[in-house]
Image (cartoon, rainbow, N blue to C red):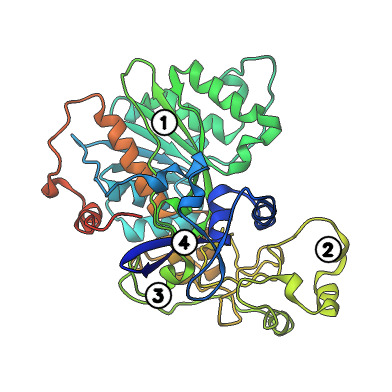
Amino acid sequence: MINVVQGGFMKQFYSLSEVADMLSVSKATLRRWDKNGKLQPVRHPINNYRVYTLESLKQFPEIAFLFEDATYQPAIPERSYRVLELFAGAGGLALGLERAGLNCVMLNELDHWACETLRANRPHWQVVEGDVANVDFTPYRGKVDVVTGGFPCQAFSYAGKKLGFQDARGTLFYEFARAVKEVQPVMAVGENVRGLLRHENGRTLEGMIDVLDELGYRVISPKVLKAIFYRVPQKRERLFLIAVRKDTTIRFEYPKPQKQMYSLKDALKKGDLYETDVPDSEGQAYPKSKKAVMELVPPGGYWRDLPLDVQKSYMMKSFYLSGGKTGMARRMSWEEPCLTLTCSPAQKQTERCHPDETRPFTVREYARIQTFPDDWVFQGPVSAQYRQIGNAVPVNLAFHMGEAIIDALNSQRQHIEYPQPELMTPYQLQLFEKSTVEYA
């Protein structure tokens, strides 16, 4: 969002790229809407770029939150809430939940280096390394409020309208459901990629909902959350599956989007998100031949910005295939959120080149884009560190989901008087102290 003061009044403008991201449409769609009059862009008063006024966006209900007056209000646990996490990875979800005020009592993860990362950063966390199928969760029965997990999406046999719990055996979702069955938490929180909505024409997700229903849980309508709306400088989307035990009166609402959108510059430079520029760290490098190609790509550009002969030689057979292939030979722009990070920043299909320097992002740059703090240290070789970060839930997105979980758990109890700064976590207190400025 671009703020410009004119005549004593603050006018808000959104770029073509920002509006496309907010509405989940292509830039080409926006240009078509411009031509048919559905949207009426204006010229930016300083740089003459095509932009959209806040007023012109009122017609879209999915971004109605932009017009609401709201400042940050922390969710404060009314008692100590305990979380057990499966498929914990390098701790993005767990750290965000901790920042919100939830207590992680056990984390299970198969990857050795991810476990070493968890142990190095949180020695007091109980990290159980190994195959989730070999973990007995019954000792935690009645002692945990929430079971969480980013289980990988796997297809399983679906017959009839009801998929039984036993029919899901052999999948990692089955292990997540087994943990829920053995622990009997008040809530279960699963997260996955957006593609789960369409996996097996939606039958996989329907089967998961059926399993949780069979186990005694009411599933809130699954929702895709855009990380750009939760103080994350990255165009990442995660699907959340929230289940509430049927014998409770819990009321869950997804976290409210924040109005301020952050760019790659906010991630890597000193500003509102971080108090310093990104620290130096290790990183991958391009081979000489690839670097020569990437040097020809402008910030925000990709392979179509290359000379035609270079396009053909670099893309090879892909040049003649349909589809945009917009991740190939892609250089990021300082002024936009980064594209979704992958497990390797130098893969040909999903390149993430630095805006100015012709190289992939370093490990610490990767971590910043996922909103990890600079003191969160990743263990293992560089390739393992990239993989851990690329697979993580962005910490700030997890934080806002954590506060929504706390609000839900509090909904069964008598609410405390707001605000009580002495009860906030350090991270909540930081945001609360800034709350004179709207998160807009």
Which numbered disc flags the more N-terminal residue, 2 or 1? 1
Task: Nearest to the eye among marks 4 and 2: give it.
Answer: 4
Disc 1: CA contacts within 10 A as few (<14), some (14-19) or many (>=20): many
Task: Nearest to the eye among marks 2 and 1: give it.
Answer: 2
Which numbered disc flags the more N-terminal residue, 4 or 1? 4
What's the CA distance linking mark 2 and mark 3? 36 Å
Left/right placement of residue 198 relative to residue 409 reads: right
Q: Which mark is residue 188?
A: 1
Disc 4: CA contacts within 10 A as few (<14), some (14-19) or many (>=20): many
The residue that appears at 60% across and 76% down in the rendered structure is 299
What's the CA distance linking mark 4 and mark 3? 22 Å
Q: Report which residue position mark 2 lands on.
A: 318
The quarter of the picture where residue 329 lies is bottom right
Q: Report which residue position mark 3 lands on.
A: 269
Quadrant for the C terminus, please: bottom left
- 130 vs 31, nearest the viewer: 31
The residue that appears at 21% across and 38% down in the rendered structure is 77
Q: Report which residue position mark 4 lands on.
A: 13
